[in-house]
Amino acid sequence: MAFWKKKDEQKKKKSPAKEWLDAIVFAVIAATLIRWLFFEAYVIPTPSMERTLLVGDYLFVSKFHYGARTTSTPLQVPLTHQKVWGTEIPSYLEWIKIPSFRLPGISEVKRNDVVVFNYPVEFQYPNDLKTNYIKRCVAVPGDTLQIKNRIVFINGEKQNSPAGVQYRYILRTTNELNDRTLRKFKISDFVEINLNTYLVHINPDIAKVLEGQDFVKELVLYERTKGVAEGDIFPNETVFPWNADWYGPLMIPGKGITVDLTNPDNVVKYAFTIEHYEGHDDVSVKDKKLYIAGEPQDKYTFKQDYYFMMGDNRDNSLDSRFWGFVPADHVVGKASFIWMSRDAYAGGFDAIRWSRIFNAIN
């Protein structure tokens, strides 16, 4: 008998349980690496991006476009986010915290990119474990953004609205809207506020078609008044009379950009960002002056880039107009394509939106 055959006979054959365990461990490691470095699955939970993205769209988010991030809390349960599946148990431990950095990517975040990012003001979690949001980037570092009567202007130039953009209308009808009518006119985001009176969020092209229908008594665009502040508008509605339709001008900060803090307006615009995202432990504002570690600041140079994000469903989107800039270290990845889409209000075979499967996201 050959020597190597004796060696083979001496080896113990793995039990089925051990083979299954090895396979599971390998699969978890492989899935974790793919999810971290390349792609992560994401499902649209809210209508803030309709009609570009619909509730029930399943996406792949590219991590390699902007570069994957390392985590600051390495003690995590693999393939989880915030909580262990089906429980309220945190999926991570903060016993060990390390600096996070971003691997090289193939592109920078650009205007009009549809971006997944961590909700910045969710301060109870580490940056990479904050809730994932998805919006469209409308302004990048150094841009000056202004919104005039719902239209976005960047550096004084009017920007084209996304093809799927939606606005809020007041719709009065002769009878109750039924499922057939809702589907025909692609109305998925609406609220009945009175008998046969609705707040609907629809594309302007659909609004033009609706206006000529026999069942429509009235269709009026919901408009906000210029110069009348709207509550919870960033950075401070008591200082700037801005609202979601009339906003700015506001310069988007970025790495290496210096702002003059002897101007009290700049203190209001940028103090929150400097305090929460720039890595300072002691930031305060007193008598319209910004202090870092007790020292008054006449100017400030930002340490990282920031972005201004908005939902395509402009009147039903919690976005940068309300909570501020998205820091670069909160960016997760670029929304790439839809791999599955399911209508939660339809049943069986009809629930699958076949025409949306494998569509690229623009």
Image (cartoon, rainbow, N blue to C red):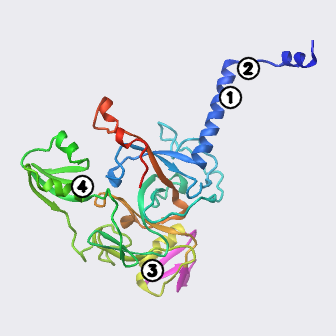
Q: Which residues are magenta?
A: 278-300
Q: Which residue is mark 2?
A: 14
Is label 3 in a helix, a strand or a loop?
A: helix
What's the mark number on residue 22?
1
| Label 3 Cα crowd, 10 Å radius (few <14 / some 14-19 / many 20+) | many
Is label 4 in a helix, a strand or a loop?
A: strand
Q: Are marks 1 and 3 in contact (CB under 8 Å)?
A: no
Image position, residue 160 (x, y; %):
34, 67
Q: Are marks 3 and 4 in contact (CB under 8 Å)?
A: no
Q: Which residue is mark 4?
A: 201
Q: Residue at 32% across / 56% down in the picture?
A: 164
Amino acid, disc 2: Lys
Q: Which residue is mark 3?
A: 267
Magenta includes 152? no
Q: Earlier in the sequence, mark 3 or mark 4?
A: 4
Image position, residue 288 (x, y; %):
43, 83
Q: Are marks 2 and 1 in contact (CB under 8 Å)?
A: yes
